[in-house]
Image: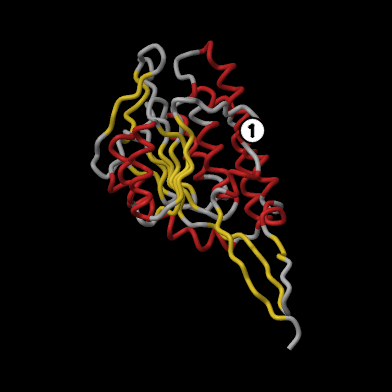
Amino acid sequence: MPRLPITKTPKVYVGGAFIRSESGRTFPFKDARGGFVGHIPQCTRKDLRNAVEAAAKAGPGWAKRTAYNRGQILYRLAEMIEARTGELAAALSPGEPKGLAAAAREVGATVDRLIHYAGWADKYEQLLGNVNPVAAPYFNFTVTEPMGVIGILAPAEAPLLGLISLIAPAIVSGNTVVALASEPKPYPAIVLGEMLATSDLPGGVVNLLTGFRKELIPTFATHAHLRALSGVASAAETKVLQLGAADSIKRVHLHPAEAPVDWFDERAQGLYPIRNLVEFKTTWHPIGS
């Protein structure tokens, strides 16, 4: 009798654990040929709130890590993704063997993106911080601090590279994130969560949700414990997010969905995405007695 393969049960990664949607709802995900891949969790507002709580608990410990250690952890994650390129490429192009080459290119760019931000871990402070000249008997220093919990809205396309390009600058500076995966292509985020679970990244630093944007974006906009929003949004979504962010006083850094970002371009990385997600603290220190 031929053996029947076991189909994976996709779950989202929240607080260092794999969970189903709080409501129990799912939506079917099919490959390019129409073959069934799995039931993807349809996360709710309650799942988002739970993810924010998990991120908030992980925040203080992650922020206290040294910059060197955070860089090491990102580098190790890049190593793990490199070693599992085939699995992630298959998740990017399920049922589409001809698309594996393009998918492998995206995985390679994702590894490079993580290495890029791992290198910034112990360098961005020297560029963003400053010793301010003042004509008075004291020193004046400006240093950076993480903002807290960041909401991430992944692009529809480049579902892995775009997601990592938004997550990496947030966590390298000591923030924690709650990320909503690509709606049409959520499967790579599921596989990424499995890798995060076995990496050195503490549970709760990165929380991945899947589901429908129209259900979750209003909560992303108004949740008071999300200190910033970063990602890709349509004009209508941006309006909702900006209105909600104004009420809850959070930063908003969104790329318009109508003008897609080339996530493979070097301009999609660098110091400025880190700067957008840190706060600046100025300290006055007296000279002498």
Q: How many marks?
A: 1
The correct choice, above or below, for 169 with respect to 93 in the image is below
Badge 1 is on which residue? 267
193 relative to 115 in the view: left or right: left
The quadrant holding residue 267 is top right
Residue 166: x and y in percent read 53, 40
Q: Residue furthest right?
A: 288
Quarter in which the C terminus is drawn: bottom right
**248 relative position to 203: left or right:** left
Instruction: Provide residue 98's location: percent of width, then percent of height.
Output: 53, 10
Q: Is residue 263 above or below residue 279?
A: above
Kindly identify the residue that appears in the image at 34 percent across and 19 percent down: 36
Quadrant occupied by the N terminus: top left
Front residue (pair 281, 203):
281
Nearer to the camera, 118 or 92: 118
Return the x and y of residue 185 as percentages of the image width and height.
42, 26
